[in-house]
Image: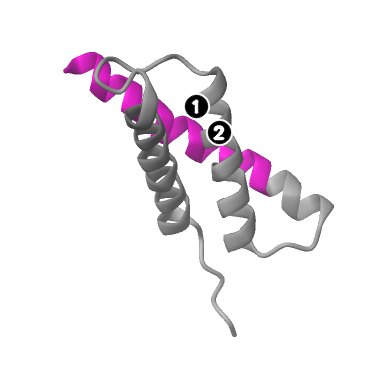
Amino acid sequence: MAPLVGSFLGVVLGSALLGALLAWVLRKVASVSRLASYAAGTAVMTVVYALAGQVPPAPFDHGLGHVAFHGVGGFLGFALLWLTAGRRKRA
């Protein structure tokens, strides 16, 4: 159970942190909203983790379980980014 939780936390935190970095670069290069850049950044990093990352433990090591494992992790990474983003107050 511990390898499964550790692998899932790695997907969530990795896609959130590296997705935030990618979102920041995207906002500097193009005129993109914060929401769109966070979504694009976490989506790209989730795909990178799914294709090149460490394979999660069974039963999530292949097929639809593998896709669902990384998809849920990427969604939670996006939610973590969106909920912890600083909001600008209008004066």
Verify whether residue 42 appears in magenta. no
The image shows a total of numbered marks equal to 2
- Residue at 37% from the left image edge and 20% from the top image edge: 62
Horizontal and vertical percent for residue 4? 25, 20
Whether 73 is drawn above or below 8: the answer is: below
Q: Main secondary structure of the magenta part?
A: helix
Image quadrant assignment for residue 11: top left
Q: Residue at x 25, y 24 (%)?
A: 5
Residue where numbered disc 2 is placed: 47
Label 2 residue SS: helix
Q: Which residue type carries mark 1?
A: Ala
* Residue kind at label 2, given as amino acid type: Val
Q: Residues within 10 Å of mark 1 (few under 14, many from 20)?
A: some
Camera-nearest residue between 63 and 31: 63
The reply to whether callout 1 and callout 2 are in contact (CB within 8 Å) is yes
Quadrant assignment for the N terminus: top left
Look at the image and tell me in which quarter the C terminus lies: bottom right
**Which disc is residue 91 wearing?**
none
Residue found 74% across the figure and 49% down from its top: 26
Relative to residue 72, is residue 87 depicted above or below? below
Camera-side residue of 38 and 72 = 72
Which residue is tagged 1? Answer: 50
Q: CA distance from mark 1 to mark 2?
A: 5 Å
Q: Give percent across and percent down for residue 81.
A: 47, 50
- When the figure is inspected, residue 24 is found, relative to residue 67, above or below; the finding is below
Q: Is residue 56 left or right of residue 45?
A: left
Under circle 1, the secondary element is: helix
Q: Which residues are magenta?
A: 1-23
Q: For the residue carrying disc 2, how many other residues have a C-alpha within 10 Å: few (<14), some (14-19), or many (20+)? A: some
